[in-house]
Image (cartoon, grey):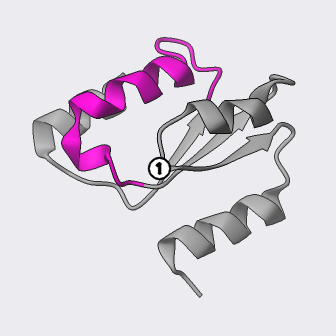
Amino acid sequence: MRALESVAATGATPALILLDLAMPVMDGLAFLSKIPEHAQLARVPIIVMSGDSRAPQLRAEQPDNVMEVLPKPVDVERMMELVRRVTELP
């Protein structure tokens, strides 16, 4: 929730969002549902992480900017590969 408030207040646009579906104040699905209210986030790539066994199915149900849904425990090498790819880092 604070991240969305910060984006709204500053107009900042992150290069990437790493999103855990299990968050304390606002869960990841609620966060994803709020993205249309923040135009600057509509094209920001999102990598979702979840321990939910249904997590891979969530990809089809989410906004186009959800690039990948990674199961927990997260394979750090795979996550870093995705981060490099979507942010075009070497």
- Residue flagged by tag 1: what amino acid is it? Asn
* Residue 82, horizontal then vertical, whole percent: 66, 65
Would residue 19 be counted in the magenta stretch?
no
Q: Which residue is mark 1?
A: 65
Q: Quadrant of residue 83?
A: bottom right
Where, quadrant-wise, is the N terminus in this rendering? top left
In front of the other: 58 or 4 = 58
Q: On the picture, is 19 further left or further right than 56? A: left
Q: On the picture, is 86 further left or further right than 5? A: right
Q: Is residue 6 above or below residue 27?
A: below
* Residue 9, horizontal then vertical, whole percent: 12, 35
Q: Quick one: label 1, few (<14), some, or many (20+) residues within 10 Å? A: some
Q: Quadrant of residue 60?
A: top right
* Residue 3, horizontal then vertical, whole percent: 34, 33
* Residue under the image location 66 percent in, 38 percent down: 59
* Residue under the image location 81 percent in, 24 percent down: 54
* Residue under the image location 31 percent in, 46 percent down: 41
Residue, far bottom:
90
* Residue 25, horizontal then vertical, whole percent: 47, 11
Magenta span: 21-44
